[in-house]
């Protein structure tokens, strides 16, 4: 009897503990559910706010493009283009806050990058007295049509969001479903429809950094050369380095410059070298090794680098800037044609300051841009161009240079070096029309000379 009572007490205690455990588990589950719902609500509110801001930016871009098509005053178009650029940047920022990783919005993003950039370029042309052509007006009209279409599409989605028909958080949930399980009429489908509306979006070629021709840039020097085999490339690499027994590593294809890469490793260093498949030009080489105590200054390193270039057939080169880090000086060189420095034709040479040995070489800029230019004679004399420079600059030297714009278009300029307020500057004056193309501030310190 006593044993039965004792057993009942044990059971009662066990059931009580289990009951309390179940109640605590239920309370914890309810708390977690509330936390999850609160998180989802916060996320949804954040997405809705970003989408609302995106719609507002696109609406304003549409209106501003309509104004731009009527602008006939340079200052007015400059103001409108500045507003379009700002709104486009805001739209890209809002778009980046949305959960769109499951949708490819590449064309939509490209439109936002180009629309502000294109109107800015037109405004700059007007400031310099260049009238907008009919083709450019037609492009503005096309951009305006795409902006209007984008505005209407986003507005429809926003209405469906406000009505509760779709949720932006559905994009996260949708990623967990396969195509057969996905319900029709979801927000992913709507965003894909927005992107499809840009399928016929034309390639824009203009004088700006987001122009299509920049992404599709081709090398005249590479494309005009014959293709070589892997063995021929290895031979050229060994001749360039003055070594033997390089090992084949890889082959790049469908890039701006297709190349073979070879390597060599010994007890103290590892070297990698890349040779172009067309022409057999050295694209780069790099030797990694420990660098000891510095015995060469940057000036001596520059002489070593220049000697190296001449020994490898790069005769008409001039040094520009350098930087120094971890006992290595990296010197920038540009090609010279008829006394004109061609800054697009860039080669970088790395020199170890302990031995003066060249341990790096990179020629992509040179290979992509180098060619013989048929340069027109400058319309201005150096004296006339100098009159276009601010009187506040104490000019110490001048020359001629071919500089690349953001669009990669090259402009022949007079290059004036001088001092203002204790700082050194370079001012580039267009040799054709006297426009001030660029001002560079030289940052000179113990670790090199850089420009901003």
Image (cartoon, helix red, strand yellow):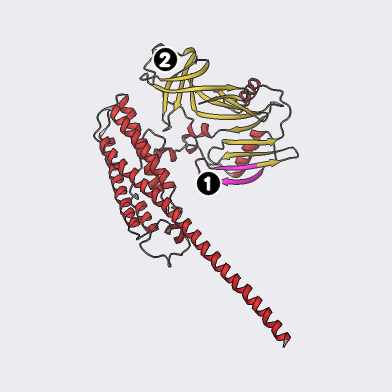
Mark identifier at residue 422: none
Marks 1 & 2, CB-CB < 8 Å contact = no
Residue 434: x and y, percent? 37, 18
Q: How many marks?
A: 2
Residue 82 is covered by the magenta coloring = no
Residue linked to disc 1 = 253
For this orientation, the residue located farthest to the bottom is: 1
**Rendered location of residue 9, percent (x, y):** 68, 80
Spot occupied by residue 298 in the image (x, y as percentages of width and height): 64, 22
Q: Is residue 245 visible?
A: no
Place residue 299 in its image quadrant. Answer: top right
- Answer with mark 1 or mark 2, whichever residue precedes in sequence: 1
Q: Classify 10 Å Cα crowding around label 2: few (below 14), some (14-19), many (20 and above).
A: few
**Left or right of residue 364: residue 57:** left
Of 100 and 372, nearer the camera is 100
- At x 73%, y 29%, the residue is 292
Q: What number is the disc on residue 390?
A: 2
> Of discs 1 and 2, which sits in the foreground?
2
227 sits left or right of 264 in the view: left
Could you give the CA–CA distance between mark 1 and mark 2, rounded to whole angstroms? 49 Å
> Of residues 57 and 390, which is closer to you in this image?
57
Q: Residues within 10 Å of mark 1 (few under 14, many from 20)?
A: few
- Tag 2, which secondary structure? loop
Quarter where residue 316 is shown: top right
155 shown above or below 73: below
Q: Main SS type for the magenta part?
A: strand
Q: Is residue 276 above or below residue 186?
A: above
Magenta stretch holds residue 261? yes
In the image, which residues are magenta?
247-262
- Residue found 34% across the figure and 49% down from its top: 198
Placement of the N terminus among the 4 image quadrants:
bottom right
What residue is drawn where x is 44% and y is 47%? 96
């Amino acid at each position: 009897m006593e044993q039965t009572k004792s057993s009942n007490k044990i059971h009662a205690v066990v059931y009580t503990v289990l009951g309390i455990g179940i109640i605590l588990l239920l309370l914890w589950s309810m708390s977690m559910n509330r936390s999850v719902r609160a998180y989802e609500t916060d996320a949804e509110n954040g997405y809705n706010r970003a989408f609302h801001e995106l719609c507002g930016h696109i609406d304003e871009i549409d209106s501003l493009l309509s104004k731009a098509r009527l602008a006939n005053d340079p200052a007015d178009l400059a103001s409108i283009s500045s507003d379009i650029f700002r709104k486009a940047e805001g739209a890209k920022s809002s778009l980046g806050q949305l959960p769109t990783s499951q949708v490819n919005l590449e064309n939509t993003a490209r439109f936002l990058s180009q629309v502000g950039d294109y109107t800015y370029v037109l405004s700059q042309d007007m400031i310099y007295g260049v009238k907008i052509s009919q083709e450019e007006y037609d492009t503005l009209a096309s951009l305006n049509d795409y902006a209007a279409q984008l505005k209407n599409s986003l507005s429809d989605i926003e209405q469906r969001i406000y009505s509760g028909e779709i949720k932006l958080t559905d994009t996260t949930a949708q990623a967990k479903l396969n195509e057969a399980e996905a319900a029709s009429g979801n927000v992913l489908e709507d965003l894909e429809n927005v992107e499809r509306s840009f399928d016929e979006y034309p390639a824009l070629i203009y004088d700006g950094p987001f122009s299509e021709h920049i992404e599709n840039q081709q090398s005249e020097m590479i494309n005009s050369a014959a293709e070589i085999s892997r063995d021929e490339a290895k031979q050229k690499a060994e001749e360039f380095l003055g070594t033997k027994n390089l090992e084949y590593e890889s082959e790049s294809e469908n890039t701006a410059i297709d190349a073979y890469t070879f390597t060599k490793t010994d007890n103290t260093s590892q070297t990698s070298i890349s040779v172009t498949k067309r022409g057999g030009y050295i694209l780069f080489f790099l030797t990694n090794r420990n660098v000891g105590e510095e015995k060469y200054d940057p000036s001596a390193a520059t002489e070593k680098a220049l000697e190296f270039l001449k020994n490898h057939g790069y005769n008409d080169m001039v040094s520009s800037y350098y930087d120094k880090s971890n006992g290595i000086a990296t010197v920038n060189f540009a090609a010279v044609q008829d006394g004109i420095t061609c800054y697009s034709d860039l080669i970088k040479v790395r020199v170890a300051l302990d031995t003066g040995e060249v341990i790096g070489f990179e020629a992509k800029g040179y290979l992509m841009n180098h060619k013989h230019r048929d340069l027109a004679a400058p319309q201005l004399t150096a004296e006339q161009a100098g009159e276009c420079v601010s009187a506040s600059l104490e000019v110490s030297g001048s020359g001629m240079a071919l500089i690349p714009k953001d669009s990669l278009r090259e402009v022949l300029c007079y290059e004036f070096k001088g001092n203002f307020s204790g700082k050194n500057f370079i001012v580039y004056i267009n040799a054709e029309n006297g426009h001030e193309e660029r001002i560079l501030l030289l940052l000179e310190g113990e670790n090199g000379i850089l420009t901003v």
